[in-house]
């Protein structure tokens, strides 16, 4: 089995300046796995309640996503998140979080899941992330995402989890909040000093940057004229990134750079419609076309230059 994600499977209620949706499939594991399924075999570790319908489950089945470790608690309710975005779509305002079945969740991994080569610890309580990490000591690459809620309420536990992962994927505000350092480059160096080999900082409409102890690599976001709903963009980015890495034999920096482009490509589709709607309908041709557009957008030649002309004195 190639890629495993632990995270929330949720019903989201979202309001943006452009529209409103009362109930849609969301959650970090949902956005991540649907995105990753275009590149590799991916399975979810998570929990849903009795209100999670056959139709909801079919979304995963149709994308070939493994649900063996997606537990169902018939007399419980699925995790719910309600959020609002104002015109600055980079900032999500949480209006309500109902942990529901996540409140007592104990992740139990099947033998198949324990053999995963790559693992994504999606945005959930950091103790749960660590419990999963400890059950897969031999994974080749373990990545983690988090959010302001856990930085504020469970910071110590989060720091312990960060120490035992290879890659941290967070947004710029979270990097600043986590370290208390306003300069992003210094904040990134501080996070790397805690143990991870690499850090990716997501910067919403401004793109994303990769930090390793030796190198720095940054890409813009795909220029979109209409962004409809940014919910799940971060998880969709991580899904494309980890999904692509999972399809590669060598997980070196070149692969990581291409993976960042695939992550951005997937995220750019995600924000075009509510929830997971746009990504669900994607084709490989659309993904490849946008990958090429990204290359044209960022490619330039290095030509030695000489100063020409004479200054007028
Ligand atoms: P993002 O990719 O950062 O936009 O993540 C959005 C997703 O995170 C939504 O679909 C929510 O269901 C989920 N989410 C929001 N708050 C939490 C939380 N406290 N724990 C787990 N998942 C959450």
Image: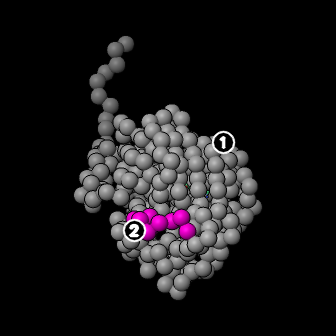
| Residue 267 visible to an observer of this rendering | no
The residue lying toward the viewer, choosing from 295 and 87, is 87
Does residue 107 lie above or below 300 as drawn?
below
Spot occupied by residue 199 in the image (x, y as percentages of width and height): 55, 58
Q: Quadrant of the C terminus?
A: top left
Mark number, residue 58: 2
In the visual, does 82 lie left or right of 249?
A: right
Spot occupied by residue 146 in the image (x, y as percentages of width and height): 61, 57
What residue sits 34% from the left and 14% below the top? 312
- Classify the position of ligand 1 by quadrant: top left, top right, bottom left or bottom right: bottom right
The secondary element bearing badge 2 is classed as helix
Does residue 186 lie above or below 112 as drawn?
above
Spot occupied by residue 77 in the image (x, y as percentages of width and height): 60, 64
Residue under label 1: 182
Q: Quadrant of the N terminus?
A: bottom left
In the visual, does 3 lie left or right of 164?
A: left
What residue sits 73% from the left and 58% below the top? 155
What residue sits 48% from the left and 41% below the top? 20
């Amino acid at each position: 089995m190639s890629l495993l994600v632990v995270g929330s499977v949720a019903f989201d209620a979202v309001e943006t300046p452009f529209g409103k949706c009362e109930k849609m499939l969301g959650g970090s594991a949902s956005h991540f796995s649907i995105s990753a399924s275009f590149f590799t075999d991916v399975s979810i570790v998570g929990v849903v309640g009795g209100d999670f319908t056959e139709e909801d489950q079919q979304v995963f089945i149709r994308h070939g996503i493994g649900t063996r470790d997606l537990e169902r608690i018939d007399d419980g309710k699925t995790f719910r998140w309600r959020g609002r975005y104002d015109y600055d779509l980079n900032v999500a305002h949480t209006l309500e979080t109902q942990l529901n079945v996540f409140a007592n969740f104990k992740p139990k991994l099947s033998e198949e899941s324990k053999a995963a080569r790559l693992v994504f610890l999606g945005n959930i309580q950091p103790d749960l992330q660590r419990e999963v990490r400890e059950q897969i000591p031999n994974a080749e690459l373990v990545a983690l995402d988090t959010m302001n809620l856990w930085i504020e309420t469970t910071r110590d536990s989060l720091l312990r989890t960060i120490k035992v992962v290879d890659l941290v994927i967070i947004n710029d505000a979270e990097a600043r909040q986590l370290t208390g350092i306003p300069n992003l480059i210094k904040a990134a160096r501080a996070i790397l000093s805690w143990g991870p080999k690499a850090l990716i900082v997501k910067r919403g409409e401004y793109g994303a940057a990769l930090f390793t102890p030796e190198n720095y690599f940054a890409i813009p976001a795909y220029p979109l004229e209409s962004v409809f709903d940014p919910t799940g963009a971060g998880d969709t980015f991580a899904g494309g990134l980890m999904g692509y890495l999972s399809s590669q034999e060598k997980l070196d920096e070149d692969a990581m750079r291409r993976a960042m482009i695939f992550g951005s490509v997937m995220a750019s589709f995600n924000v075009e419609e509510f929830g997971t709607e746009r990504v669900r309908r994607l084709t490989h041709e659309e993904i490849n076309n946008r990958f090429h557009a990204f290359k044209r957008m960022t490619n330039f030649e290095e030509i030695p230059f000489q100063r020409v002309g004479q200054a007028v004195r």
